[in-house]
């Protein structure tokens, strides 16, 4: 084996390299592979890698491992798994109307609802139920919390307040009136703050009305991204939980709009696109 075949998909600009586990050498260092191929200047460039493989879970069809561009493992990625699902249909490896993907955070179902063009795929995905307690997010607090709401945090000498949730990955949200401030350094510092033992995605949320919110994203292990299914879900559910919006919300990020429904049975449903960028081969010499 001299190269690794892959396809690059994106969900509203949030891009992922998708590869098949069977096409990778058993001794390949996946962390180093992800760091190399995701590099924006010397690699293919991506916000993460989705590796598709077999599963032993009878409730799933395949297993999807998500690796961040810094080489760390992600529990889940809404856009990453959507890109992985699109890859399977694009490669004609899957043709059923529904796909069940196992991730480290559980089994998620994907239903292909539209193909706007031959390289675009619209999915409705059930991604599980939110978790709110400080232990489940997780967040270090000065006592047990059934929900982490309006918690103070000090970043570079200034105090902010955040609410947090776990929707497959930890998400911390700061609600703001506008985005005309330097939010990236705040996100960078919050991601690795000691109150988050597993680090955290950081989302800045601006409420437009009961059905619409706008977000800016600092993603754990990836930095600033144009979109994120996990962050969209976390921001939408927290907005509804705090009674700022309804339970069906259009989440507008820099890259596009994700529809989030937090159903009455507590299940979160995401609706969004995955688009093919290109397919290629990654030479193994780039890993030496």
Image: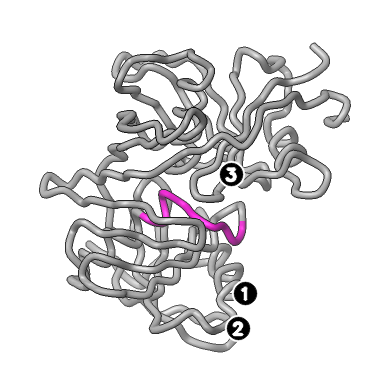
Q: Is residue 234 magenta?
A: no
Give the labeled residue for mark 2.
156
In the displayed structure, would residue 39 be above or below residue 173? above
Give the residue at x 59% y 80%: 182
Give the residue at x 68% y 30%: 30
Mark 1, Cα crowd under 10 Å, few <14 / some 14-19 / many 20+, is: few
Q: Give the extent of the magenta segment.
A: 223-232
Q: Earlier in the sequence, mark 1 or mark 3?
A: 3
In the displayed structure, would residue 262 be above or below residue 58? below
Q: Are marks 1 and 2 in contact (CB under 8 Å)?
A: yes
- Give x and y (percent) for residue 284: 82, 23
Mark 2, Cα crowd under 10 Å, few <14 / some 14-19 / many 20+, is: few
Q: Earlier in the sequence, mark 1 or mark 2?
A: 2
Dividing the picture into quadrants, the one containing residue 82 is: top left
Q: Nearer the viewer, mark 1 or mark 3?
A: 3
Q: Is residue 185 left or right of residue 132?
A: right
Q: Are marks 1 and 3 in contact (CB under 8 Å)?
A: no
Q: Is residue 157 left or right of residue 230?
A: right
> Which numbered circle lies on residue 185?
1
> Which numbered circle lies on residue 15?
3
In space, the residues marked 1 and 2 are separated at their CA atoms by 10 Å
- Give x and y (percent) for residue 160: 44, 82
Q: Nearer the viewer, mark 3 or mark 2?
A: 3
């Amino acid at each position: 084996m001299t190269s690794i075949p892959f396809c690059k998909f994106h969900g509203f600009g949030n891009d992922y390299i998708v590869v098949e586990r069977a096409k990778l050498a058993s001794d390949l260092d996946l962390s180093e592979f992800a760091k190399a191929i995701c590099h924006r200047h010397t690699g293919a460039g991506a916000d993460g890698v989705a590796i598709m493989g077999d599963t032993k879970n009878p409730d799933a069809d395949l297993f999807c491992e998500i690796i961040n561009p810094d080489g760390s493992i992600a529990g889940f990625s809404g856009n990453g798994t959507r890109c992985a699902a699109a890859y399977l249909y694009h490669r004609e490896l899957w043709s059923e109307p529904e796909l069940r993907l196992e991730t480290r955070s559980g089994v998620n179902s994907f239903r292909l609802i539209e193909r706007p063009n031959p390289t675009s795929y619209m999915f409705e995905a059930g991604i599980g139920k939110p978790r709110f307690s400080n232990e489940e997010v997780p967040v270090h607090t000065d006592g047990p919390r059934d929900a982490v709401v309006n918690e103070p945090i000090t970043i570079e000498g200034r105090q902010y307040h955040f609410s947090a949730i776990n929707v497959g990955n930890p998400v911390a949200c700061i609600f703001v009136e506008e985005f005309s401030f330097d939010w990236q350094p705040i996100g960078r510092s919050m991601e690795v703050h000691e109150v988050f033992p597993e680090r955290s995605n950081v989302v800045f949320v601006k409420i437009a009305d009961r059905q619409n919110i706008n977000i800016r994203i600092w993603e754990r292990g990836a930095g600033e991204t144009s979109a994120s299914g996990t962050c969209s879900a976390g921001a939408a559910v927290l907005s509804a939980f705090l009674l700022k919006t309804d339970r069906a919300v259009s989440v507008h990020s820099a890259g596009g709009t994700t529809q989030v429904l937090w159903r009455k049975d507590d299940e979160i449903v995401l609706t969004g696109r995955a688009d093919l960028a290109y397919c290629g081969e990654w030479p193994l010499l780039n890993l030496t």
